[in-house]
Image (cartoon, helix red, strand yellow):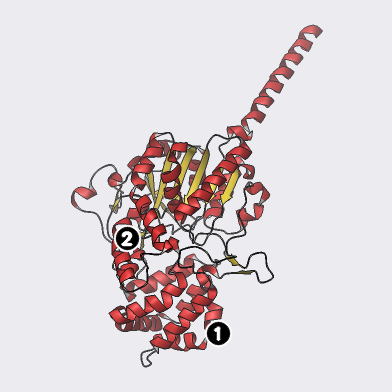
C-alpha cells in the first residue's frame, strides 16, 4: 500500500511539474504578441535645443495662453473682437500673432523638415515595463489603452512608438519599421499588434503602403484614425464659415471634455468671456475676415504660415478628394511653393492616401486581423461648411470608418440608406458602405481619444488588441453582447443603441 501511495505521489508531482511548466510556457513572450501603441497629433512633447543648456519644451501646438496674454498687441485687439462698439486693428493683430507664432519655433523649414536641434525626448525601444510613467501620464488617449492592454499581457509586452507628430507620414513610417524590427528582435515574436489612434492611423497608412509585403502585423486596431483626413482641413481651400449657434456649444463641450488636460486653460479662457462676447467675436470674424478675400489671404500668410505653414502633418490630414483644391488655393496666394521639398512630401503622401483602401484590404487578406473604431454623436468643428458632419469632435465619422454613409448631425438617414442589417438603430449610420463593414465598430458619445481607464470602452479596445475576441461583429456580439453600434455614458459604460 505504501508503494502505491509513493507511486501516486510521484505521479502527481510529475503532473504538477508538467502543468506548472505548461502555464509558465504560456506566459513567455513568445506566446504573447507584443503590442505597439501609436499616439496622435500632439501625443509627444516637442523640444528645441535638445541636449544644450537652452533646451526647452515648445508649447503644445505653439499655444501658450499666458504668453499670448502678456503681448499687449495681441491682448488689446483680441479683446476688441469680443465687443460691439470697438473695432480691432486687424493689421496690428495679425502682425503680433505672426511674430508670436514664429517665435515659438514649432513651424518647420521650407523643405518640410524640423529645425536643427528639435525633436522628442521619449523615443524608447524598451517595453513600457521600463517606462511605467507613460502608463499614467494621462488619464485619456493612447496611454490609457496601453495601460489597459498591460493589465492583460503585462507591460513587458507593450511598447509605445513615440514620434515627432509634425513630420511627414512616410518618413515616420520608415522609423516605425525600424521600431517594429527592434521589438521583434527583442521579443522573438514573428508578428506584432499595432494600436493606432488618430494621426497614428495616417502613419499606419504610410507603413502598410511601404511594408505590407513584410506580413508582420498580427492585428491592426485603428481608433478614430485620420488616414482619410478630416473636413476641417477644407479651410485650406478657403471654405471658412462660422455659426455661433454651433460654435458656443462646441466650445463648452471642449471645455468640459478637456478638464484637467493640457488644453483646459485655452477653452476656459475663451468661455469665461461669456456667450454674448463670443457671439460678438464670431460676428466680427465673419464680417471682417472670413467674408473678405483680402483679409483671408492676409490671415493665412501672416498668421497661419509662420505658425504651421511648413508642417507636413497638417497638409496630410486633408481629405483625398480636397487635396488638389487646397493646393491650388494655397499656392495661388503664395502660402505653398509647389517647387519646395514640403510639396514633394505632401504630394507623395497624397498618393499613399489614394492607395490606402487597396492596402488595407491586402493586409487583411494576408492574415492581419483588422478592427476599426469610429466614434460619432458630435457635430464637426464649426469653421467650415462641413460642420454638420457627424464626428467624434474632430475626425469625421465617414472618414474614420472608411466610407460609412452618415446622416447630417441632428438628422436621420432616409430611403434605401435607412434599411439593412448594417444600419444603426438610431438611423444615423449605414455601415454597409464601409470598406470593411464586418470589422468596423461605432461608438456614440465618446469624443476623440478621450478613453477612460477601466471603462467598458477601454476594456473593449484592449480585448480586441490582445485577441481575446476576433475583430468582427459576429464574434463581438457572441462574446460581449455588443452590436456594431454602441453608446457610451459619462463613465463610458457601453450599451447597445436602440
- Which labelled disc corresponds to residue 70? 1
Nearest the viewer among 293 and 258 is 293
Q: Is residue 377 left or right of residue 262?
A: left
Q: Earlier in the sequence, mark 2 or mark 1?
A: 1
Total labels drawn? 2
Residue at the image point whose x is 35% and y is 65% from the top:
338
Q: Secondary structure at mark 2?
A: helix
Q: Looking at the figure, which quarter contains the N terminus? A: top right
Residue at the image point whose x is 53% and y is 68% from the top:
60
For label 2, the residue is: 323
Q: Is residue 327 left or right of residue 9?
A: left
Q: In the rendering, at what x and y percent does residue 163 appear? A: 54, 56
Furthest-left residue in this view: 415
Q: In the rendering, at what x and y percent does residue 413 appear? A: 24, 54
Q: In the rendering, at what x and y percent does residue 277 appear? A: 40, 84
- Which labelled disc corresponds to residue 122? none
- The answer to whether residue 1 is visible is no
Give the Cα distance between marks 2 and 1.
37 Å
Nearest the viewer among 347 and 230 is 347
- The answer to whether residue 253 is visible is yes
Discs 2/1, front: 2
In this view, 356 is above or below 111: above
Residue at the image point whose x is 81% and y is 8% from the top:
2
Image quadrant where residue 180 sits: top right
Amino acid at each position: 500500500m505504501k508503494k502505491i501511495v509513493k507511486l501516486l505521489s510521484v505521479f502527481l508531482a510529475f503532473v504538477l511539474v508538467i502543468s506548472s511548466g505548461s502555464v509558465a510556457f504560456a506566459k513567455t513572450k513568445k506566446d504573447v504578441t507584443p503590442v505597439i501603441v501609436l499616439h496622435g497629433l500632439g501625443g509627444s512633447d516637442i523640444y528645441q535645443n535638445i541636449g544644450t543648456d537652452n533646451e526647452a519644451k515648445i508649447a503644445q501646438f505653439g499655444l501658450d495662453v499666458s504668453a499670448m496674454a502678456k503681448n499687449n498687441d495681441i491682448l488689446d485687439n483680441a479683446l476688441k473682437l469680443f465687443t460691439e462698439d470697438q473695432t480691432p486693428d486687424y493689421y496690428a493683430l495679425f502682425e503680433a500673432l505672426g511674430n508670436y507664432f514664429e517665435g515659438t519655433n514649432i513651424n518647420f523649414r521650407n523643405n518640410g523638415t524640423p529645425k536643427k536641434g528639435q525633436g522628442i525626448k521619449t523615443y524608447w525601444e524598451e517595453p513600457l515595463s521600463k517606462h511605467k510613467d507613460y502608463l499614467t501620464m494621462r488619464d485619456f488617449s493612447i496611454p490609457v489603452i496601453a495601460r489597459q492592454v498591460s493589465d492583460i499581457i503585462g507591460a513587458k509586452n507593450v511598447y509605445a512608438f513615440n514620434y515627432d507628430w509634425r513630420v511627414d507620414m512616410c518618413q515616420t513610417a520608415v522609423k516605425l519599421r525600424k521600431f517594429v524590427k527592434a521589438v521583434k528582435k527583442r521579443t522573438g515574436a514573428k508578428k506584432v499588434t499595432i494600436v493606432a489612434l488618430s494621426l497614428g492611423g495616417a502613419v499606419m497608412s504610410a507603413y502598410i503602403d511601404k511594408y505590407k509585403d513584410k506580413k508582420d502585423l498580427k492585428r491592426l486596431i485603428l481608433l478614430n484614425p485620420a488616414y482619410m483626413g478630416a473636413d476641417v482641413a477644407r479651410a485650406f481651400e478657403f471654405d471658412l464659415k462660422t455659426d455661433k449657434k454651433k460654435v458656443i456649444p462646441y466650445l463648452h463641450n471642449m471645455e468640459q471634455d478637456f478638464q484637467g488636460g493640457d488644453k483646459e486653460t485655452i477653452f476656459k479662457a475663451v468661455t469665461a468671456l461669456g456667450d454674448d462676447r463670443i457671439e460678438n467675436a464670431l460676428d466680427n470674424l465673419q464680417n471682417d475676415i472670413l467674408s473678405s478675400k483680402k483679409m483671408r489671404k492676409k490671415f493665412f500668410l501672416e498668421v497661419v504660415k509662420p505658425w504651421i505653414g511648413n508642417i507636413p502633418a497638417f497638409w496630410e490630414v486633408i481629405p483625398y478628394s480636397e487635396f488638389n483644391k487646397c493646393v491650388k488655393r494655397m499656392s495661388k496666394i503664395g502660402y505653398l511653393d509647389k517647387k519646395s521639398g514640403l510639396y514633394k512630401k505632401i504630394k507623395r503622401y497624397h498618393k499613399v492616401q489614394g492607395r490606402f483602401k487597396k492596402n488595407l484590404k491586402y493586409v487583411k487578406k494576408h492574415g492581419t486581423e483588422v478592427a476599426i473604431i469610429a466614434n460619432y454623436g458630435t457635430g464637426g468643428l464649426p469653421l467650415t461648411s462641413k460642420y454638420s458632419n457627424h464626428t467624434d469632435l474632430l475626425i469625421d465619422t465617414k472618414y474614420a470608418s472608411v466610407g460609412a454613409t452618415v446622416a447630417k448631425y441632428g438628422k436621420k438617414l432616409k430611403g434605401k440608406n435607412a434599411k439593412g442589417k448594417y444600419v444603426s438603430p438610431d438611423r444615423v449610420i449605414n455601415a454597409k458602405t464601409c470598406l470593411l463593414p464586418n470589422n468596423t465598430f461605432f461608438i456614440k458619445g465618446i469624443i476623440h481619444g478621450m478613453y477612460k481607464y477601466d471603462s467598458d470602452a477601454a476594456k473593449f479596445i484592449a480585448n480586441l488588441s490582445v485577441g481575446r475576441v476576433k475583430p468582427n461583429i459576429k464574434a463581438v456580439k457572441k462574446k460581449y453582447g455588443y452590436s456594431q453600434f454602441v453608446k457610451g455614458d459619462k463613465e463610458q459604460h457601453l450599451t447597445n443603441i436602440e
